[in-house]
């Protein structure tokens, strides 16, 4: 049994696991008031609106330092590069979290020492984001539909698709809808080389013994 699907994080926001395959650059579309636990909710133009970025207090302080404390005064269409920092702690344990590495609308590198714990400060460095730096859009609806059709042609069931994408892209995305357009196009190329499922092919009578990744349409590989 492939347990990867049973341990995927479920989230209503951009998750640190969604950045496992590397940093991504986003455009701020809207800033909303969150709740007591996560007071800031940032809607990203290149990510599903129902999965906003809910920055930590550390990131909020950095954004306030760079762009101002009042979001209404932020630059028009500001952009940020976010990445997964494996050293971010929660309750004293390193579990990984989202940090910002680059921001638009700053003309020089920013260095800010912020308190991470009692009596300890960490230096955060933010670099200017170049105007020509490409954004990292989530997969488009058309490409996702094309990818879904390809999965069906190859006989790959729904509960195996995300795990397969993460395997080939070396990521840990929490949903197909949040993988990048580039990752989706890469998967289409990979899957195109796999044979289509044969209509007469049937899984064993015992579903628990059937692993679609053993079929010719999936397989291992890079």
Image (cartoon, rainbow, N blue to C red):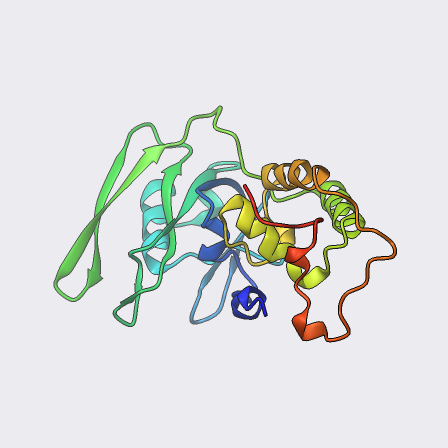
Q: Is residue 217 above or below residue 203?
A: above
Along the line of sight, the residue nearer the viewer: 191 or 19: 191
Q: Quadrant of residue 95?
A: bottom left
Residue 45, percent from left and from top: 59, 43
Please provide percent x and percent y for residue 40.
Answer: 46, 59
Number of numbered markers: 0
Can you give x and y, in whole percent of width and height, for residue 102 in the image? Answer: 38, 37
Location of residue 157 by image quarter: bottom right
Q: Quadrant of the N terminus?
A: bottom right
Residue 140 percent coordinates (x, y): 69, 42
Q: Is residue 64 above or below residue 89?
A: above
Residue at screen point 67% across, 74% down:
208
Q: Residue at x 54, y 38 (%)?
A: 136
For this orientation, the residue located farthest to the right is 199
Residue under the image location 51 percent in, 56 percent down: 14
The reply, left or right, for residue 93 in relation to residue 170 is: left
- Residue 50 position (above or below residue 123): below
Tell me if I can see residue 20 in this picture: yes
Q: Residue furthest left?
A: 119
- Most foreground residue, 71 or 15: 15
State the residue in front, 130 or 188: 188
């Amino acid at each position: 049994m492939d347990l990867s699907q049973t341990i995927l994080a479920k989230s209503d926001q951009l998750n640190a696991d969604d950045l496992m395959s590397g940093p991504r650059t986003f455009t701020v579309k809207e800033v909303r008031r969150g709740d007591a636990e996560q007071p800031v909710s940032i809607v990203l133009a290149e990510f599903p609106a129902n999965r906003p970025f809910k920055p930590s207090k550390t990131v909020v302080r950095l954004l306030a330092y760079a762009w101002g404390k009042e979001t209404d005064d932020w630059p028009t269409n500001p952009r940020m590069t976010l990445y997964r920092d494996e050293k971010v702690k929660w309750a004293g344990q390193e579990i990984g979290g989202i940090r910002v590495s680059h921001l638009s609308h700053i003309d020089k590198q920013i260095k800010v020492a912020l308190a991470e714990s009692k009596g300890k400060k960490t230096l955060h460095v933010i670099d200017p984001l170049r105007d020509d730096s490409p954004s990292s859009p989530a997969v488009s609806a058309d490409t996702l539909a094309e990818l879904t059709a390809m999965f069906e042609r190859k006989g790959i069931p729904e509960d195996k698709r995300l795990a397969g994408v993460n395997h080939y892209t070396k990521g840990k995305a929490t949903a197909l809808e949040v993988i990048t357009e580039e990752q989706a196009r890469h998967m289409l190329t990979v899957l195109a080389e796999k044979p289509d499922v044969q209509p007469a092919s049937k899984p064993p009578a015992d579903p628990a013994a059937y692993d679609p990744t053993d079929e010719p349409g999936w397989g291992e590989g890079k």
